[in-house]
Amino acid sequence: MAPAAQEHRLVLVTGPSGAGRTTAIRVLEDLGYEGIDNIPLSLVPRLIDGPPLDRPIALGLDARNRDFNATALIELIDTLTRDPRVSLQVLYLDCAVPELIRRFSETRRRHPLAPAETPAEGIEREIDLLAPIRVRADHLIDTSDLTPHDLKAEIARWFDADATGRLSVSLQSFSYKRGVPRGVDMIFDCRFLANPYWEAGLRARDGRDAEVAAFIRRDPRFAEFFHKLQDLLLFLLPAHLEEGKAHLSVGFGCTGGQHRSVAMVEMAGAALAEAGWPVSKRHRELERKGQGLAPAGKVSVA
């Protein structure tokens, strides 16, 4: 039996209050999406069960939703990912705490999670609440230093397929001990490569470090592996684009998600970017430790 055709394209937009979620929804509406802000989580499945829509949907979800909780949203993401009728992407808008405090101070708004307290207390509470969802995001944009114009340009870069005419590619490193990330289209196991963890001088570093990357490249199997990987990806990306796919996610896994998989994401991302493909990079385990974000105001892009 042929697999069911994907009938619904969804982008879930979330992140802490004040990070730009409303602006993002408006930008996506300008790009042709149907925007629905603060829809209760319990109603989202009804959209999927209804008739197919002729345009994609952008759903704004945050702590102000009346039935919102992190566990329910993660379950919803997992359910939609498994549904063959749905093409799902999760966009998380992040922002540094001092900047969020400044924005609330300027607008004199009360924070939805601390209506009778200071905005700082509500911000910290919401960031903790959203932490597990942030890890699940397909796209993460730090808006700390972005103007609304900058944010619009970044969103258009990843969600306006007509403007770019190219397939956007996301590369993600991960640890097999913590499980395979959701929604990846292809996975490459890097555990056969020499492990820098066993070198005392490299153990505390990660795959973005030049010496760690050099150690991995010295593995006799690396050169052939990377050459074949690069050839495979550059062969497959145009084929997926011709089939109408707008986004492709590729995972690289190793034991701890700190050295080999991270280095492979960095090197593969550089090679694809040099070939002209839009590439975003995520390092799941480094983000869990607070080390995986790009500098403030930058999207993690090769």
Image (tube, rainbow, N blue to C red):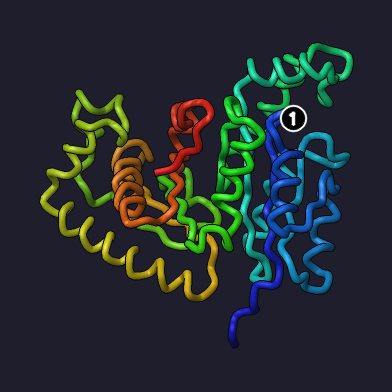
Q: Is residue 278 above or below residue 154?
A: below
Whether residue 89 is visible here, answered yes or no, is yes
Q: Is 45 in front, or is 243?
A: 243
Q: Is residue 271 positioned above or below 185 on the image?
A: above
Any part of residue 254 in sight: no
Viewer-proximal residue, 275 or 221?
275
Report whether 137 appears left or right of 248.
right
Residue lying at the far bottom of the rendered structure: 1
- Residue 226 at x, y = what percent? 23, 56
> Which structural element holds mark 1?
loop
- Above or below 181: residue 237: below
Quarter holding residue 129? top right
| Residue 5: quadrant of the picture | bottom right
The residue singled out by tag 1 in the image is 17
Q: Return the x and y of residue 37 as percentages of the image width and height.
A: 82, 46
- The structure residue drawn at horizontal position 33% and vertical position 43%, both measured from the top left corner, is 266
Q: Is residue 172 left or right of residue 197?
A: right
Quarter of the image with the C terminus is top left
Task: Give the residue displayed 60% in from the left and 26% down from the top.
Answer: 144
Quadrant that contains the N terminus:
bottom right
Residue type (three-letter) at the residue carrying disc 1: Ser
